[in-house]
Amino acid sequence: MVNPNAEINRLRELMPATARMKTKLMLNDRQLDVIKAEFPRPWQQTHAVSINLDLWHNLAIAERDLLFLRTVCWVTLANVLKPNWYQALAGAGLVGSVVEVLQGDAVGVIAAAGVTALAGWQIWRGASGPQIDIAADDKAVQVSLRRGYDQADAATALIRAIEAVPPLEGRRVLTVNELVRCQNLRRQAGRSEFSVSEGYRR
């Protein structure tokens, strides 16, 4: 059985230095997820990552390490305030909506609101879609190299962790997103020449 205090301390040391001040580790044996992090809000100073220790101890140390690093990396990457064209478009649409409301132009309000909604959807999709999951996997593997892991071993450990989590959480099969992530990681581990990551990043 994993010692709670020792494991928390070990995971803190595993984290990148830039994430230690912004990540709050918690134990929650009531949650159904092996490890869980809420979608980061821009106004939050710290982001909670909670672990169900009863499920966590079923994973090998390497699997725990990579799954934890992947979660921390996901939190840092899933940032809705990352500057892009869609944010500029959303801002323009919002300003346009206000102007049209003040002018009493109903058609203009609808058009501006539509632009804002479309841009907002693209921002959310970019911050929470599969490309972020793949990027978090890639970053976790890269961080693990600074912790003494070999790239192929790290990618393989993360694959094993992804495949081990569903049964622990009461799911029978991997999601499509998890299958895509595993395929991308197999390329990093040298077990496949086919990568799906580029298609998701476009």
Image (spheres, rainbow, N blue to C red):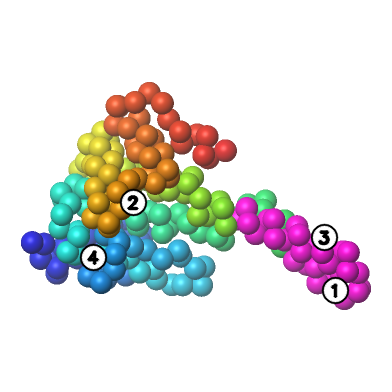
Give the residue type at disc 1.
Answer: Val
Spatial separation of the CA atoms under disc 2 and disc 4: 16 Å
- Identify the residue at image location x=11%, y=62%: 2
Give the residue type at disc 4.
Answer: Asn
- Identify the residue at image location x=51%, y=72%: 43
Q: Which mark is residue 111?
A: 3
Quarter of the picture holding the N terminus: bottom left
Q: Earlier in the sequence, mark 4 or mark 3?
A: 4
Q: Which mark is residue 101?
A: 1
Spatial separation of the CA atoms under disc 1 and disc 4: 49 Å
Quarter of the picture holding the C terminus: top right
Q: Can residue 144 be seen here?
A: no
What secondary structure is the stretch in magenta mostly built from? Answer: helix
Instruction: Residue under label 2, please give it.
Output: 70
Asked if the magenta segment contains residue 119, the reply would be: yes
Spatial separation of the CA atoms under disc 4 and disc 3: 47 Å
Q: Earlier in the sequence, mark 1 or mark 4?
A: 4
Asked if the magenta segment contains residue 9, the reply would be: no
Spatial separation of the CA atoms under disc 1 and disc 3: 11 Å
- Identify the residue at image location x=56%, y=51%: 126
Instruction: Residue under label 4, please give it.
Output: 52
